[in-house]
Image (spheres, helix red, strand yellow):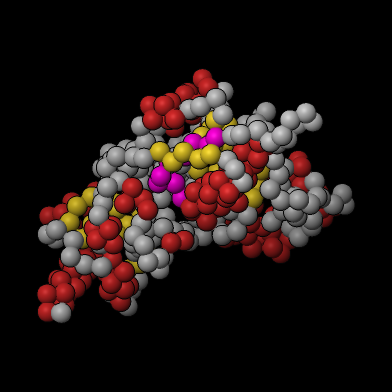
Amino acid sequence: MQRFYFDHNATTPVAPEVLEVVVSCLGQVYGNASSIHHFGQGAKQRLELSRRQLASLIHSHPTGIVFTSGGTEADNMAVLGVARAAAGTGRDRGPRTVHVITSAIEHPAVLSPCAQLEREGVEVTRLRVGSSGVLDPDDVRRAMRAETVLVSVMHANNELGTIQPIAEIAGIAREAGVPLHVDGVQALGKIPVDVEALGVNLYSMSGHKLYAPKGVGALYIRKGTRLAPIVFGGHHERDRRPGTENVPGIAAFGAAADLAARTVAADAERLAALRDRLENAVLERISGTGINGSRGGRIPNTSNMYFDGIDGEALVISLDLRGFAVSTGAACSSGALTPSHVLTAIGLSSDRARASMRFSLGRTNTAEQVDALVDALEASMAHLRRISVNA
């Protein structure tokens, strides 16, 4: 049986060009990038090439790039680091009361460190979004306080694909003198990213969403942004993130960034057409379906749809048995008993949220695969609804 992958927001296959780099580095670039001998300096050169490749993709200076173990660590470094630096004690005063603004539809990699900050005495405002899944920048302005030290808003939502008005939010944060952190994990490589034009202070990235291996990510840090450390050890990454660098993974991330820089425009156009083909066919052929969130202003590869009258997990299993990999939402929340916090935040009932599916396309998907997926959806829906009626 042929199998087709429609879950690229969870993770992507390693691109052939990237795989070549990984294998080459594992076999030949095995020195520690902190060592001063020939082998160490070879690793250091490969590390810095990747830093330049990633910086080029997001239009930043290479010194602003700090490599991490992934997007989650990058988010934690930004959120915890900024807030804790701002709340630090002075010689003649106690800890400062600080306030952080985020949105209700952020990834757990942002929401969880925000919850930890609350346990440490930091006040957190989680802004609501409407049915479109897009944050109103004026809500950010209204939430600002004298104590606000950080705004953290994702660039593109991992479940809906909706793109947030980052440049407008950055302008508001800049007027207030507050740094803006953006979780860019789902945006990088799918839409153009220019951290200078956006005006962000921190931008989180992940390799495995970009056709690189798992276990590598990065955080862009604008010069002058204060961060308290969240990990302690050596002097790696210019004293910003200790630990021996994962040179093969970082080299792969750099190669994937270089590939994305050349293909992002063409990929976006092709994937948007495939996504629209999928949605239009489903809406036409299967009753009780609809699009969650706004159909405009999305990353081109992502669709989130509801299928009334069924359980999403049952539909995932049914489609998997037919050879199609899809998901009900964020992979890190798979198996959770509660419905998606993103879908309930935009106003869906618990039943409709549980009946929703995310389809995220990638470079290897074709029109023929999309058409076959629609056929499988139609057959699975008919089967599941028949079982539900007869139960």
Find out whether residue 101 is within the magenta segment. Answer: yes
- Regarding residue 100, the answer to whether it shows in the image is yes
Name which quarter of the figure residue 334 lies in: bottom left
Provide residue 290's location: percent of width, then percent of height: 19, 52
Q: Is residue 268 above or below residue 340?
A: above
Provide residue 205's location: percent of width, then percent of height: 54, 46
Find out whether residue 102 is within the magenta segment. Answer: yes
Name which quarter of the figure residue 90 lies in: top right
The reply, left or right, for residue 92 in relation to residue 51 is: right
Q: Nearer the viewer, residue 238 or 42?
A: 238
What count of labels does the image hold? 0
Provide residue 325's location: percent of width, then percent of height: 35, 67
Q: Residue at x 16, y 54 (%)?
A: 283
Q: Residue at x 42, y 55 (%)?
A: 9
The C terminus is located in which quarter?
A: bottom left
The reply, left or right, for residue 148 in relation to residue 106 is: right
The reply, left or right, for residue 291 in relation to residue 145 is: left
Q: Is residue 24 above or below residue 58?
A: below
Provide residue 245's location: percent of width, then percent of height: 72, 53
Q: Nearer the viewer, residue 252 or 89?
A: 89
Q: Is residue 298 above or below residue 138?
A: below
- Regarding residue 210, the answer to whether it shows in the image is no
Q: What span is in magenta?
A: 99-107
The N terminus is located in which quarter?
A: bottom left
Q: What is the residue that sits farthest to the top in this orientation?
A: 175
Q: Residue at x 68, y 48 (%)?
A: 230
Q: Nearer the viewer, residue 308 or 24?
A: 308
Q: Residue at x 54, y 30 (%)?
A: 148
Q: What is the residue that sits farthest to the right in this orientation?
A: 37
